[in-house]
Amino acid sequence: MMSLQPVWEVAVGAVVLVVAMVIHGAGMYLVLLRAAHHGRRGGAAARGPERQLFFGALIIMMLGTHIFEMLVWAAVFTGIGAIANVRDSFYLAAVTYTTLGYEDIKLPPEWRLLAPLCAMTGVFAFGWTTGVMVRILSRHFAPTVAPGSLPPVRPGA
């Protein structure tokens, strides 16, 4: 008789992936909301340090969202008994989520199908974060230089 363990692994991983994407959506919504609020109150026109500090705060919000998602995966790894302690679980989740792929800590064979789903979570999340960053940069940090006012770029210069 065929074991249902692989089906169970994929089902658990798919649920965690969806939960992580819901968390990511909430985090990116808050980042965009904060950016929009900053733009409405004239912050988009800010120059120098204020603008950089604002962008730094948005980056911290994005980082916090990613770290929270890694913690969710770490809680799952610990909760199912695949990894004994929280520190190793977080390390494995972070290495897998970011697709670094170190192999010093591995999931046991009966749970190894969770690793690609954790990596897919990170790929989806980093792609989404990149889109949010591009949107913010294009709307709030667009160059204020008039088109054609910069000298042409010379090849090899």
Image (cartoon, grey):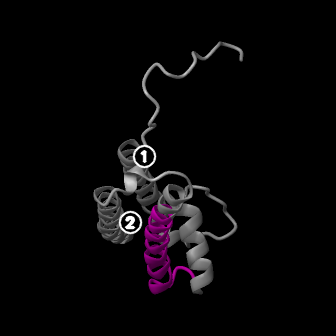
Q: Position of residue 86 (x, y in %)?
A: 57, 85
Instruction: Tell me, for residue 6, which label it has, or none.
Output: 2
Say which of 90 and 38 sits in front. 38
Predominant SS of the magenta segment: helix
Q: Position of residue 78 (x, y in %)?
A: 50, 84
Magenta-tinted stretch: 57-84
Looking at the image, residue 13 sits to the left or right of residue 59; the answer is: left
Q: Quadrant of the C terminus?
A: top right
Q: Which residue is mark 1?
A: 137
| Label whose residue precedes the other's in the sequence (2 or 1) | 2
Mark 2 residue crowding within 10 angstroms, few (<14) / some (14–19) / many (20+): some
Tag 1: residue type? Leu
Q: Secondary structure at mark 2?
A: helix
Q: Residue at coordinates 49% horizontally, 78% vertically from top-left?
A: 77
Instruction: Tell me, for residue 114, which label it has, or none.
Output: none
Q: Secondary structure at mark 1?
A: helix
Q: Residue at coordinates 38% horizontally, 57% vertically from top-left?
A: 43
Q: Quadrant of residue 144?
A: top left
Say which of 32 and 109 sits in front. 32
Instruction: Find the distance from the CA under tag 2 to the CA under tag 1.
Output: 42 Å
- The extreme top residue here reads 155
* 124 to 88, vertically: above or below: above
Looking at the image, residue 98 sits to the left or right of residue 124; the answer is: right
- Residue 68 painted magenta: yes
- Residue 129 painted magenta: no
